[in-house]
Amino acid sequence: MKYVIIILQGVIPMTKTAIVTGGSRGIGAATSSLLAANGYNVIINYNASADAAIALKADIVSKGFNAEVYKCDVSDSDEVNSMLEFCVSTFGLPDLLVNNAGIAGQKLFTDITDSDWSRMLSVDLTGVFNCCRAASKYMIKKHTGSIINISSMWGVGGASCEVHYSAAKAGVIGLTKALAKELGPSGIRVNCIAPGVIDTDMNSKLSEADIAGLADATPLCRIGKPSEVAAVVEFLASDKASFITGQTISVDGGFII
Ligand code: NAP
């Protein structure tokens, strides 16, 4: 029996488990779907969008892949710890964490309130910290794992009227670099993606003229698709990226070069 199991393990790819925060909409939904299609059991995390999460799970399962949904606010460390326990009891120890959940906001710097600042940092930076801390405890036990944090080109270049967002996203890049150094000896890779303007609800408040202007400022002359970010998540998570850690990969059509 022992020999049969060893032979099968050599032939059949082992299923891996991924958690995608904010996994039911936009970039997160594209990522959840792509990872499921590539053999991951996916925990689709959501906070407010229960219907979208349930519909996405149904779509993934209808295609013969595995997914579960889990409600949790990533800014709440107790909820995040419970999500990890749910992951372990449902699919096993996590192999991949995609920190995608995020909020944005545009305001003059002098109009940013204490509460604007606090909520932005709580979701976009502390949320990443909470999830990395909770997941890495399990990954260290396995001595393997991959963490992919979704930052933004504004975390690299800074955006006028988005100082709190830019600061949080720059923090994500710093967290990624430091954590890659600390977790590398435990066999865990930590990378970051800095998307440019991507066609999701996050940009739904922008006017057509604003979107056209951003497309004009992009060397590839268009805004990006969620699937184009998901493809890089899938690459960074794969063995093709086995010697890549601590990096921030821009997926921005050349906006920031
Ligand atoms: P989106 O369509 O607005 O989706 C945001 C996602 O984050 C939703 O699934 C939302 O889930 C989740 N989320 C928000 N607050 C949460 C919380 N407290 N706890 C758990 N989940 C939460 O935006 P998107 O464009 O796909 O953005 C995904 C990531 O890419 C974000 O980190 C964003 O900053 C980054 N990004 C986006 C762009 C862009 O142009 N779209 C560019 C650069 C970087 P619920 O609806 O369930 O709350």
Image (spheres, rainbow, N blue to C red):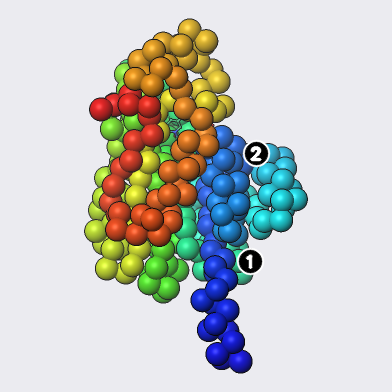
**Cβ at disc 2 under 8 Å from ligand 1:** yes
**Residue at left offset 31%, top offset 49%:** 176
Which residue is nearer to you in this view: 11 or 162? 11
In the rendered view, does 224 fall on the left or right side of 241? right
In the rendered view, does 211 fall on the left or right side of 43? left
How many labels sit on residues? Answer: 2
Q: Eyeballing the image, is 168 above or below 257?
A: below
Location of mark 1 (residue)? 90
Q: Residue 84, image x and y in percent?
A: 53, 62
Q: Eyeballing the image, is 87 above or below 105?
A: below
Q: Residue 80, image x and y in percent?
A: 51, 55
Q: Earlier in the sequence, mark 2 or mark 1?
A: 2
Q: Residue 46, image x and y in percent?
A: 60, 45
Q: Quadrant of the N terminus?
A: bottom right
The kind of residue tagged 2 is: Ser
Which residue is nearer to you in this view: 222 or 148? 222
Location of mark 2 (residue)? 49
Eye-nearest disc, 2 or 1 = 1
The kind of residue tagged 1 is: Thr
Label 1's element? helix
Q: Residue 127, image x and y in percent?
A: 44, 47
**Residue at left offset 51%, top offset 30%:** 225
Label 2's element? loop
Which residue is nearer to you in this view: 163 or 257? 257
- Examine the rendering and report whether any part of residue 161 can be seen: no
